[in-house]
Image (cartoon, coloured by chain):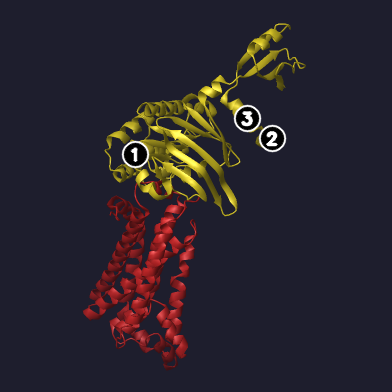
Chain colours: A red, B yellow
Amino acid sequence: MKIFSSHLFKLEFKRSFKGLMVWSLSLGLTMYLVVVLYPFVIDMYAAIPAEFYDIMNSFGGIPDTIMEYFATEGAMMLQIFGAIFAVMEGFQAINRDEREKIVEGLYVLPYKREVIFFTKFVRITVNVLIFSLINSLLSLIGFWTVSESVEGSLYLLFCVLNTAMYLVIAYLGFALACLLKPNQKSMISMMIPFPLYIISVVSLLTNNSILQKMKYLTPFTFANSVEILKTDFTFEWENLILFMILTALLLVLSLFRFKKREFMV
Amino acid sequence: MSIILVENLRKYYGVNRGLEEASFGVDEGEIFGFIGPNGAGKTTLIRLLLGLIQPTSGIASIMDMEVRQSFHILNKDIGYLPGETFFFPEMKGIDVLRFYQKMHNVEEFRFLELVQILQLDVSKRVNEYSFGNRKKLGIIVAMLHRPKILILDEPTSGLDPLMQQIFLNLLLEEKRRGVTIFLSSHVLHEVEKVCDRIALVKNGTVSQVYTMADIHNDNLKKVILVPPAINFEQIGLKLSKLENNEAHYDFDGDVNVLIEFLAKHQFQNVKIRDASLEELFIDYYKEDIQQ
């Protein structure tokens, strides 16, 4: 049974390529700049008054190495902007065709809806992987530019888990677009990354044990840059498995909804 | 043998009516016109036939397969032109056509031929096309895979008169090849030119299906009298309007009786002709138009 169309994939990829490059290069270059500024900000950290240390500690503390600096300053920015890109990639895979009203021409092609669904799913995955690869490489070039040594395995682990987090967010966006009625505003997709990020920050900052448990409700937890790159790393596998199961369930539900999705102007 | 069969088809969008009731069949190789005012349910019926929306009740089947279950198989043999054509706006016309050609797994030859016939500049981007040129692109996309059935929603809207004629000739050529054509239109003189049968839809209900022969053989005549005689409502004559120093009557009856009656009077001019489809349409929808 055919579930993938290479022609549709090429078309989708071509149409999304410009946006992908704009997002990847602009965020990647920002990461590069953040990293190459490290030699200049070391002195700034030394000048921070002691009374700010508690607040700083909540966000990973004063960095001692470039990796710690990247974890506290660069990676957090990378994650929130990356999550915004990912959710829009997922959501707009369905939503854009409906907004541009080209969906009528796609649905009357001699293909099952599963083919369209799965092809879009693959395209989202490929775009997120390319986005993550470009950002990871540009950050790495930044480390090389300031001639700082990088703990390769830790950085690779962060990149892999961060990409997994992007994929989860992108698939949640894709599922949201399938589950909502057609022709929604794409800003609705922001209901996924922002609350999830806030939950991760709150669970990190609080001393309340119940609120701390909320970290399991956000995929930012298993890709927490400070945990991975700065402190002794304990892998939040429960959190990763929870989101893998949740995402898989939502994708199956989305497929059923997409198969019955009606065309509306 | 009906290639398209619609039985008690009904579609509601929540509480809003899309289509109240439709039952009819379209025979293989015929051109079937679907006529009705805006909001009557024409586009809803077309979308039901393509599996773009699901019926609330009833069945639509094409080539003995129920559309709801088999639309992905049926779409191989169906060419569809929507009322408003939208394509990937940033792509060139030629790239759009190549995409659809590859998706249908057919040769380029056919669309290149259609591009020539319809005189479309395919080097332009879709967002640079006028409404009419987008329509031409839509016509080519609908026909490039040589489908057995063409479903066309307002196909000539936006085309200039010359292009409308070219398009109608193209339809007649497709009909000669054995293609079944189902079209909705407001341009009634075109429907009259090409259709074998028509269905009239009113308030979401397909109420009547006529052959064009029925319409042409209809006894309804239009009688125009100059100078305007206004007291002639006898022997089946019915005054419909007075304008430009002319009295317009409808006549439904024996034309010999009519001639005998008119011969008893003096006129400057008398015209007797068959009622056109447009006049039939206006008569049928008179109440709606007046409302």
User: On the same chain: label 1 and label 2?
Assistant: yes
Q: Position of residue A77 (x, y in %)?
A: 38, 74
Whether marks 2 and 3 lie on the same chain: yes
Q: Dot 3: what SS? A: helix
Give how far across and how far down residue A116 sits, in percent. Answer: 35, 54
Query: From the viewer's perspective, is residue B90 above or below residue B136?
Result: below
Residue type, mark 3 in image: Ile
Q: Secondary structure at mark 2?
A: helix
Residue extending farthest bottom = A50
Label 2 sits on residue: B290
What is the chain letter for disc 3?
Answer: B
Q: Residue at x 48, y 24 (%)?
A: B193
Q: Quadrant of the N terminus of chain A?
A: bottom left
Residue nearest the observer in this picture, A79 or A28: A79
Q: Which residue is mark 1?
A: B123
Graded by Cα atoms within 10 Å as few (under 14), some (14 to 19) or many (20 or more), the crowding at tag 3 reads: few
Distance from the alpha carbon under mark 1 to that under mark 2:
47 Å
Same subunit, labels 3 and 1: the answer reads yes
Residue at the spot of label 3: B282
